[in-house]
Image (cartoon, grey):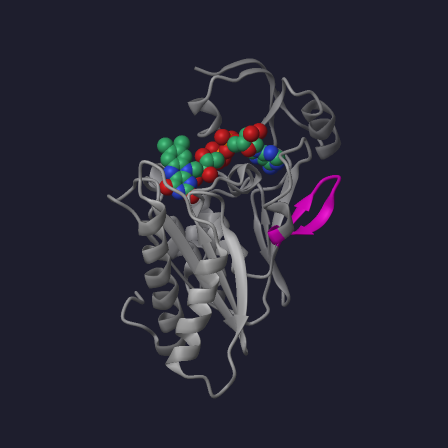
Amino acid sequence: MFTIDKYVVAESLEEAYELNKSKRNAIIGGMLWLRMGRKKIRTAIDLSALNLNKIDEDDESFKIGCMCTLRDLETHENLNKSFNNIFHKSLKHIVGVQMRNLATIGGSIYSRFGFSDILTALLSLDSYVELFKGGIIPLNEYVNMPLDNDILMKIIINKDGRKAACNSHRISATDFPVLTCAVANKENEWFVVVGARPMKAKLSTFNLNNNYEKDDIDNAVLKIIDNISFGTNIRGSKEYRQILADALIKRNIDEILNGGYYAD
Ligand SMILES: Cc1cc2nc3c(=O)[nH]c(=O)nc-3n(C[C@H](O)[C@H](O)[C@H](O)COP(=O)(O)OP(=O)(O)OC[C@H]3O[C@@H](n4cnc5c(N)ncnc54)[C@H](O)[C@@H]3O)c2cc1C
């Protein structure tokens, strides 16, 4: 069981940052993951009074405050319209609506979980994190940075015209995924993300000429799978994950190119 000695609603990001410098204190998002652990938190720092629970859109990008819930992203009409519904599709498998109404995007992306559905989806897009002290960093860089005491303020997604598709495989509905996958395409460039390997999501890229053939796709996918490491855990073996990755990547490419059999 985790415990909290003191609870503070931060009045500014500076105050939250100063409090979060101590390893015994912790920022709280939806607190769903924190409460699964045994951490003895001296001061829990609540960011909910800092206006960070909004999704702002302009011509260039979406800016998503860290206190937005996963459900906010799942149901945001323009966000989903802009990226072929991948937020709805990747998030709908996580436990249930009540849970997704509490879990925050800040807590989810800060944690960089290997099994993360949303990290997989976001990595396929032109996504960034905005940190209070660290500034704006590409998500693909942030994903491999060590966990530190900076505050993740916002997620930024540029509207660069990518078409996207995502899917995952679970042993049973609402369980953690065995594998997650997202693919995006902009002109000849393809962005392929495979997560829950069971290690955290990894982005790979490849190019296709205008006059590509099916073999070109098969070879590109083969090369990507050869260059990604997979592992074994209670949900599946390394070999099973390799086979799944091949199928999920190709289904997503098919969905982007042809509407695909698996599109919903
Ligand atoms: C039972 C269960 C099943 C789940 N299944 C899945 C699943 O199938 N797929 C999936 O993708 N996810 C799954 N999740 C993860 C879930 O979707 C959330 O990602 C997770 O709960 C973290 O979000 P939170 O808001 O609860 O974070 P919290 O628990 O509040 O915080 C998590 C960590 O992030 C830190 N933190 C929070 N906000 C910030 C911030 N703004 N800046 C810096 N640090 C911050 C906290 O200090 C803490 O260390 C599951 C979680 C649970 C509990």
Name which quarter of the figure residue 13 lies in.
Answer: top right
Q: The C terminus appears in which quarter of the rendering? A: bottom left
Q: Which residue is rendered at x = 34% and y = 42% of the image?
A: 97
Comparing 204 with 77, the one in front is 204
Judge whether residue 138 is colored magenta. Answer: yes
Is residue 100 in view? no
Position of residue 68 relative to residue 215, above or below, is above
- State the extent of the magenta-drawn residues as a range: 128-140
Where is residue 176 drawn, in percent x and y? Answer: 34, 40
Query: In the rendered image, which quarter contains the N terminus?
Result: top left
Q: Position of residue 150 (x, y in %)?
A: 69, 35
Picture layout, residue 224 above or below residue 44: below
Residue lying at the far left in this picture: please name it. Answer: 172
Residue 51 located left or right of residue 105: right
Measured as percent of width and height from the top left, residue 187 is found at: 54, 78
Q: Residue at x 59, y 61 (%)?
A: 126
Note whether 92 is above or below 57 in the view shown. Answer: above
Left/right of residue 254 with respect to residue 44 in the rendered view: left
Establish if 84 lies above or below 68. below
Is residue 44 shown to the viewer in this render?
yes
Is residue 126 shown in magenta? no
Residue in view at x 33 percent, y 50 percent: 239
x and y percentages locating residue 165 in the rendered image? 41, 64
